[in-house]
Amino acid sequence: MKQIEVVAAVIRRGNEIFATQRGYGEFKDWWEFPGGKMEAGESPEEALKREIREELDATIEVGELIQTVEWDYPSFHLTMHCFWCELVCEALHLNEHEAAAWLSADNLGSVKWLPADRDILVEIGKVLRSGLSIRKSAPEDIPEMLEIFAAARRFMAGTGNPDQWSEDYPGKELLKSDIASGDSHVILSEGRIVATFVLRPGNDPTYNIIHDGNWPNDLPYATIHRIASRRERKGMLHAAMQYALERYSAIRIDTHRDNTVMRNAIAKEGFTYCGIIHCWNGTERLAYQFTKP
């Protein structure tokens, strides 16, 4: 069977996504996410930016991969890489499609989707209904991130945990380093940054020695560090975990013994307590791991 590999842009604007109606061919009048075939030597992100320029005269920022759909049509097998995207400018011109619409979670089913595109609607609906989105942090986010960490320090002090983070932690240089490494993320609600966290894959040296317990396995893992929020919305750890588990099978995290709020949230997410580790500065932390079933 013929193999075709394409990319698709799930362009998001607040709690809506952009859908287009095909104006040609076998599937004329069906709806799809804009995009198209990858050319030789292109990365998926490069192909997607080119396709959107050609189809919509628009420039986009390509975000995280949502899902790679594998679908058998009668005459070919389709591999479709679907990415969250955002418009750099609002102008959109339909060069190839006969119609388009911005759809909310409640009316995703109001149009006739191509079968492969329909395969990711459940995941898209979950994200749109949460009102949350996650992207990698950028240098221009640092002032807001510093505000969030200051609010988190005040909250921890007010809930019996004044010693986990010092007054200048995490500082601007550490945030710059996290951003440069690609590990820093922000959580947005209606386009506004409400939380931040680090998701770092690979071995964490502070986890090499664990006291009064053991890690459950030696699987490759990623670690969630420095999660903090404005306290405007609940469920920030849950949002970070859902994001992490789309990418990694094992997640580790640690927190201060006095941080009862975070310990309760960690337990709610299903982490297993593993033992005691020591941070880079020698202070004690309770360590946990979550492994996908």
Image (cartoon, grey):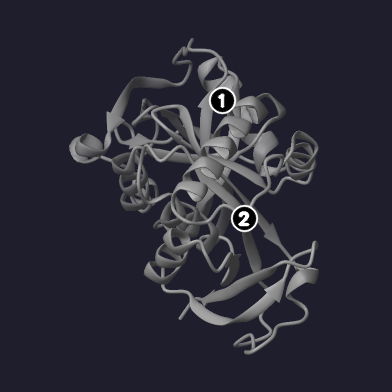
Residue count near mark 1 (Cα–Cα under 10 Å), binned few <14, some 14–19, many ≥20: some
State the separation of the CA atoms marked 1 and 2.
49 Å
Question: Which of the 4 image quadrants contains residue 130?
Answer: top left
**Disc 1 and disc 2 in contact, CB within 8 angstroms:** no
Residue 115 badge: none
- Pointer 2 residue: 163
For residue 12, above or below residue 272? above
Tell me residue 95's x, y (percent): 48, 16
> Could you tell me which residue is drawn at 78 percent across and 78 percent down?
208
Which dot marks residue 52? 1
Residue at screen point 80% across, 62% down: 281
In depth, the one of 236 and 11 nearer the eye is 236
Residue kind at label 2, given as amino acid type: Asp
Specify the amino acid type for callout 1.
Answer: Ile
Local SS, label 1: helix
Residue 36 location (% of width, % of height): 55, 36
Residue under the image location 63 percent in, 87 percent down: 217
Label total for image: 2
Left or right: 112 in relation to 267: left
Q: Residue 273 location in percent, x, y?
A: 52, 80
Answer above or below: position of 21 versus 216. Answer: above
Element at label 2: loop
Looking at the picture, tell me which residue is in the foreground, 132 or 50: 132
In the picture, measured across the screen, residue 112 lies left or right of residue 288, that is left
Q: Is residue 171 visible?
A: yes
Label 2 environment density (alpha carbons within 10 Å; few <14, some 14–19, many ≥20): some
Q: Earlier in the sequence, mark 1 or mark 2?
A: 1
Residue 82 shows up from this direction = no
Taking 126 as reference, is 110 left or right? left
